Amino acid sequence: MRSRRIGAALLLLAPLAAVVTAGPALAADCSTYPWMDERRSPEQRARALLAASSPHQIYRWLVEQPANNPRQTQWAGDVVYPVQVPCTPTVVYTDGPDGIRFTDGVTAFPATIATAATWNERLAYVKGAAQADEGYRKGKNVILAPGIASGRTPLSGRTPEYLGEDALLSGLMAAAGARGVQSDDRVLATLKHYVANEQELDRQTSSSNADERTLRQVYDLPFEIAAKRAGPASIMCSYNQVNGIYACEHPRQNSVLKDDVGFDGYVMSDFGSVHSTAASLVNGLDQELNRPIWFTPARLDAALAAGQITRARIGAAALRVVTAYIRGGLFDHPLPATPVADVSTPAHKTIARTVAEQGAVLLKNVNSTLPIKPGEGTTIAVIGSTASESAHSVCSLPWRFGNPTTMRCEDLVTPLAGITARAARAGATVTYDNGGDPAAAAVTAAGADIAVVFGYQRAGEFSDLADLRLQGGGDELISAVAAANPRTVVVLQTGSAVEMPWLDQVPAVLQNWYGGEQMGPALAALLFGDVNPSGKLPMTFPRSLADTPTAGDIARYPGVVVDGIRQVSYSEGLQVGYRWYAARGVDPLFAFGYGLSYTSFAYRDLEVTGDGRDGVRIRFRLTNTGKRWGTEVAQAYVALPSSTGEPAKRLVGWSRVTLGPGRSRTVQIDLNRSDLADLHLLQYFDPARSGWVTARGAYGFTVGGSSTATLHDTLHVR
Ligand code: BGC
């Protein structure tokens, strides 16, 4: 099974050995074709192209490989097309939440969840732009990222590829990333995977069953926000069913994405997520990923003959694809004839390092254990296999196809290398133990002034996590090290939440996620205080798996198989992530939005004004009450009037504020009219009215450094 998938994956990246017929020679002068006339709008150009195309040339746009390899005419299964009209580009798709995959010479950025933890839209943007630049020079011009899910369960294997459990944070960060990719003007971004794609277990044979309000507010909303704010070229529909209908043939593609949200790009399928010809096309799928299976000329012709689809719908799908390609610059900026071997640059490496630094979350730090203040002769014990392994461990761990080759990470600077280099500058020395034997590691720890011990969790596509425990004996190792050295710092390299049974035994914990190739210098800078931590959790860390919204009810997770389909009941409804813990009065281990700094911040004087329809202004005073410069991600939450039945908390905005020691600033978070309307910040979805509603009543705002913020003010909306 696995090798078949790998084979399939390679096809995506390197289409079948082409049977290229000679066809008409490429026109010497593309400027004679109206679709190459840059004075026309992208849509006018696309219409001109389709008007000059034969029906089967138009069909080509409906499948990735024929669309993207204009002169190849034959595919497996005797699928034959005419050569495409002249002057259409070669297009190459590549996967890439964390970098351009399956190749070397590229920057391995930290995992997407680490990007989310920066709460820094600008950084997500520059990372996207850097990735697009690398993609283009590597000969790839569509990036299948960013990914969005809603963090329904931390067991979901692809949690590290997504942006956490809040619709606004996910939506805005995905929008920033997609805008960055598309800022290159020759590379397209794809939001994926639409929708309610919240587990890897039986992902192709499961149905996510949720009521309409839940779907709109929790699962559609991050896509809606990202689509509205970024204008991505495409959105990928997911493997799963939604309420019994496969996502790629679900009417939501039309009714929600295209009609309601106004998404004007094209919907593409995931790899093998199409199950029909007519139902998929009629319900909004525009392009089948990879090679022709369901949208072959023969099947399209048969569906036309049977009256199941129309030529107009085929034309509309093609128009979306061609318009998106032209708008995104693919027609005007052909891929380089020869890909560049090494496209990573010092500037890109700096971005990777900055994401790792800003995305790291300081979870615990008592007795000023951190930053490490080494003197001449200080010894630091670094412990744990993932502190030193090469790319084959933790560069960026979407453990795809059971191996680490998705990102080669040949430029990885390991934590051990980074810490050793930084310690040497301070005259300190580092001892290393791979942690394979906790007793031996304890001896190493006992002989040092401070111990830095690494715990890991591998998570990735194709399977969910079995539990939220550290892997490789991490819990035992940390306990043993902590017992030997009271100054033990835990560094966590995980893609999702983990339980921390040893938390009371250690004074400091730093969450590093999958830190990418520059994790070594980034970690060293954080541990030694050259950089002050500012990351905030984009997902709740529960005390135990049993506290999570889907625990204790197999109907919710993993779902119950009926007639070959795993029926997953989303009966927790709106109470996903921090909303669940608030509703149940369950204290998480670390709340959504939480993260410490080496300095401290105080909030006061919250004042919320506005009418709630044309605008809301949230103002408060933030003071750096500590002794260092620091950056705080100040967050604003709202509780809607109780008549709405909404959860007690909803993130409505945030601001990253940098302040010197003792300094104060008035922070202002403005929710303007378009934010309120487009992002539905104060609205709820009313299925009866099939629309979003702003209720009259009292809106309780809170601001602070996490979702447990308490500084409060009320706004009355009439
Ligand atoms: C994944 C997608 C990915 C596609 C192409 C699928 O297995 O679900 O996220 O873009 O493969 O590699």
Image (cartoon, rainbow, N blue to C red):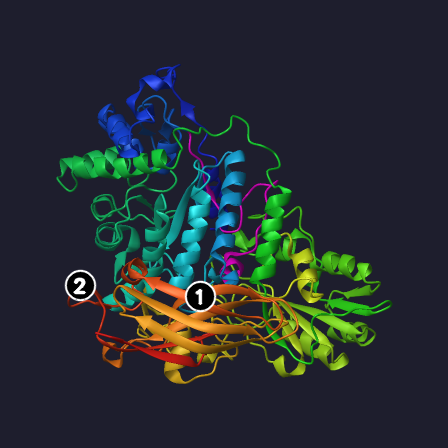
The label nearer to you, 1 versus 2, is 1
* Residue occupying the point 16% across, 38% down: 310
Can you give x and y, in whole percent of width and height, for residue 317 in the image?
25, 39
Taking 62 as reference, is 627 left or right?
right
**Label 1 to label 2: alpha-carbon separation:** 29 Å
> Which amino acid does the dot numbered 2 rest on?
Ser
**Residue at the farthest right position:** 377
Q: What element carries label 2?
A: loop
Residue 496, how many percent across, how many down? 51, 66
Q: Name the residue under label 1.
A: 654
Proximity of marks 1 and 2: CB atoms separated by less than 8 Å: no
The stretch drawn in magenta includes residue 102: yes
Q: Which mark is residue 690?
A: 2
**Badge 1 or badge 2: first in the primary sequence:** 1
- The residue shown at (61%, 60%) is 357
> What amino acid is at disc 1?
Trp
* First to last magenta residue range: 90-116
Task: Answer few, some or many: residues within 10 Å of disc 2's Cα (few below 14, many 20 plus, some between 14 and 19).
Answer: few
Q: Is mark 1 on a helix, strand or loop?
A: strand
- The quarter in which the C terminus is drawn is bottom left
Which secondary structure dominates the residues rendered in magenta?
A: loop
- Please give left or right for residue 130 compared with residue 424 in the image: left
